[in-house]
């Protein structure tokens, strides 16, 4: 009976330890980080504002290149193929996926910029912990934008290969 | 105040209210659609001089003709022009990389 009771206690203790470990926030801010954020709040805001401008520029340029590739290359090519009775489902599928990825990239960028804008106006001087806790979702949003550019670039590479394959069959 | 003067005043206020309401709706749409984030005519987001110059030189007016024949020559030209576009994209080295928001960037 005593043994059973002891093992039960161990299980309860182990459970408590596990809960205590899991309940620790992954991105918990340390005291020194909190102090640094408060002290450098103005500089941090400036860094974020600069980043906002750089990202806006990158988004504008990449967006216009993606739009041009879709509207001046992919769509007219597939239309010409259809008019010339050349059936190529891979190129048509590539165009659809590129358009979806482009729209997704634009939407993810808007989400990211909203999160960034919130942080630019956040009072990191009085609430460094709140500021730091918002950094993690912002990083995740930025990562989704980055992945979007990779997806689009891969689709362009795939498109070039498909066109080269088509060229060989002519 | 004459009746005509009063009517003119009402018309003036009504016009102002209408202008304010439509401007407010436009601004809400402008913000909610996300267009604000790619609008580089905002103060502080304007392109600098060197950027405008490089823009003018890099612009191409190529467009694949959807009414033309799909020949080897046409596809060759297509791929050459497409390469110019992809080269321009590649100039943006690691866009939206994680480094810009790292702890180190903020001195943490």
Image (cartoon, coloured by chain):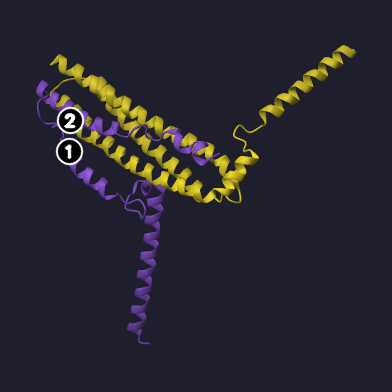
Dot 2: element? helix
Q: Nearer the viewer, residue A39 or B67?
A: A39
Q: Chain coloured purple: which letter?
A: B
Q: Nearer the viewer, residue A146 or A95?
A: A146
Do pointers 2 and 1 mark residues of a single chain?
yes
Q: Chain of mark 2?
A: B
From the viewer's perspective, is B107 left or right of B3?
A: right
Residue at x 44%, y 40% (from the top left corner): A112
From the viewer's perspective, is A17 left or right of A50?
A: right
Residue lying farthest to the bottom in this orientation = B1
Residue at x 54%, y 49% (from the top left corner): A41
Residue underneath mark 1: B60
What x and y, as percent, mark residue A74?
Answer: 22, 29
Which quadrant, please, contains the C terminus of chain A? top left
Dot 1: element? loop
Q: CA distance from mark 2 to mark 1?
A: 9 Å
Which colour is chain A painted?
yellow
Residue underneath mark 2: B81
What x and y, as percent, mark residue A99?
Answer: 31, 32
Q: Chain of mark 1?
A: B
Residue at x 58%, y 40% (from the top left corner): A133
Q: Are marks 2 and 1 in contact (CB under 8 Å)?
A: yes
Which quadrant, please, contains the N terminus of chain A? top right
Residue at x 33%, y 78% (from the top left corner): B8
What x and y, as percent, mark residue A162?
Answer: 23, 20
């Amino acid at each position: 009976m005593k043994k059973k009771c002891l093992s039960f206690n161990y299980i309860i203790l182990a459970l408590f330890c596990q809960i205590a470990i899991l309940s620790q926030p992954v991105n918990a801010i340390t005291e020194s980080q909190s102090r640094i954020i408060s002290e450098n709040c103005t500089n941090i805001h400036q860094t974020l504002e600069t980043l906002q401008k750089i990202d806006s520029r990158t988004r504008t340029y990449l967006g216009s290149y993606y739009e041009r590739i879709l509207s001046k290359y992919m769509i007219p090519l597939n239309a010409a193929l259809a008019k010339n009775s050349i059936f190529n489902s891979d190129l048509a599928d590539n165009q659809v996926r590129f358009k979806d990825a482009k729209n997704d990239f634009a939407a993810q960028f808007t989400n990211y910029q909203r999160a960034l804008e919130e942080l630019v106006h956040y009072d990191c001087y009085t609430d460094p912990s709140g500021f730091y806790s918002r950094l993690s979702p912002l990083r995740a949003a930025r990562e989704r934008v980055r992945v979007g550019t990779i997806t689009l670039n891969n689709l362009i590479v795939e498109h070039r290969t498909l066109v080269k394959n088509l060229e060989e069959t002519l | 105040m004459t009746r005509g003067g009063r009517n003119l005043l009402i018309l003036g206020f009504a016009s102002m209210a209408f202008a304010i309401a439509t401007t407010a709706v436009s601004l809400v749409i402008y913000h909610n659609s996300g267009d604000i984030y790619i609008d580089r005519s905002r103060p502080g987001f304007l392109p600098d001089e060197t950027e405008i110059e490089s823009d003018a030189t890099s612009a191409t007016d190529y467009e694949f003709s959807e009414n033309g024949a799909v020949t080897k020559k046409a596809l060759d030209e297509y791929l050459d022009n497409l390469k110019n576009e992809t080269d321009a994209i590649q100039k943006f080295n690691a866009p939206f990389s994680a480094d810009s928001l790292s702890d180190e960037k903020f001195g943490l």
